[in-house]
Amino acid sequence: MSVWRIVIAAAASLPAAAQAVGPEQGHPHEQLSLGALARIAQNPLAKVYSVPFQNNTNLGTGPRKQTENILNIQPVLPFGLNDDWNLITRTVFPVTSQPGLSPGQGSSFGLGATQGSFFLSPARQTAGIGWGAGILVQAPTVTEPALGSRVWGAGPSGIALTMRGPWVVGTLLNNVWSFGGGPQDAYNTFTFQPLINYNFAHSPGTYLSTQPLITADWLAPPGQRWTVPVGLALGQVFRVHGQPMNANLGAYYNAIRPDNAPAWQVRAQLVFLFPR
């Protein structure tokens, strides 16, 4: 219940916060169609402030096949450095409710490791392709030992994207290495996320999407490293009292996974959009 109080309080403060940081006035998004807003929402390089609340319910986690829940609060803030370059920042705060992952281990609830990505991106696309490159930093904000490592980490991160007709296709990838601490805190993880969206021309703002989060834990034993989901989500962009929002709901099956990883994931997302 406390998690949702955090969400509601944060959501209530979003419009005022956006006005404080945004230089433009007069709500320019009111002139945008739902279809145009959907394409903006699907572009991680767009110059738009957004605050997604992404809830992932993982089914069949751990030796007793229990349910894990992770609420990712992940504000995205782009900044124009000059006429040629943008800096895009994305921070992920995971609020996790996790069952015991080994015999005799109890459940855990709290904040996991925070990840902050910082991308330099050209202000204009080249040959219809947008891209960004930068660094991901992982901070040891875990409130319980079972929710993540207690040491810092960092590594390279990148984005590439193209928009063709009804399609928005791209990819996000990174690799993060820990530094400091002992062997029990070490990590070396790879993330690859394809971003494929199809927008329905006859239903503005409605789209079909697949964004599986493919990961590898390079320190795990062979056969236990990869998690490869497959699935789909249906989404809709809409306005509530003039505020643009993006919601989607999907399900992913982990076709390749470690022994105690969940078999299924249900992903629900609500995004507050603040186009500039």
Image (cartoon, helix red, strand yellow):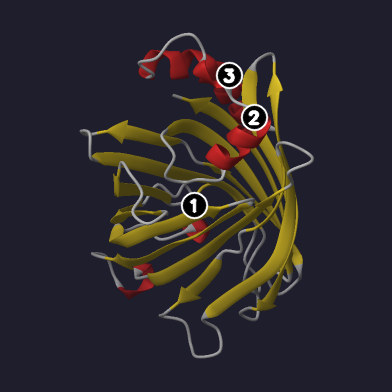
Which quarter of the figure has residue 33?
Answer: top right
Image mark for residue 31:
3
The answer to whether residue 271 is visible is no
Element class at badge 1: loop
Q: Pointer 2: what residue?
A: 245
Disc 2 from disc 3: Cα separation = 15 Å
| Residue 171 horizontal side relative to residue 249, left or right | left
Disc 2 from disc 1: Cα separation = 33 Å
In the picture as drawn, the residue positioned furthest to the bottom comes out as 222
Image mark for residue 72:
none
| Residue 153 horizontal side relative to residue 39, left or right | left
Identified by mark 3, the residue type is: Gln
Image mark for residue 144:
1
x%, y% of residue 265?
Answer: 71, 61
In the picture as drawn, the residue positioned furthest to the top comes out as 26
Q: Residue at x 44, y 14 (%)?
A: 19
Element class at badge 3: helix
Label 2: how many Cα within 10 Å (few below 14, some 14–19, many 20+) = many
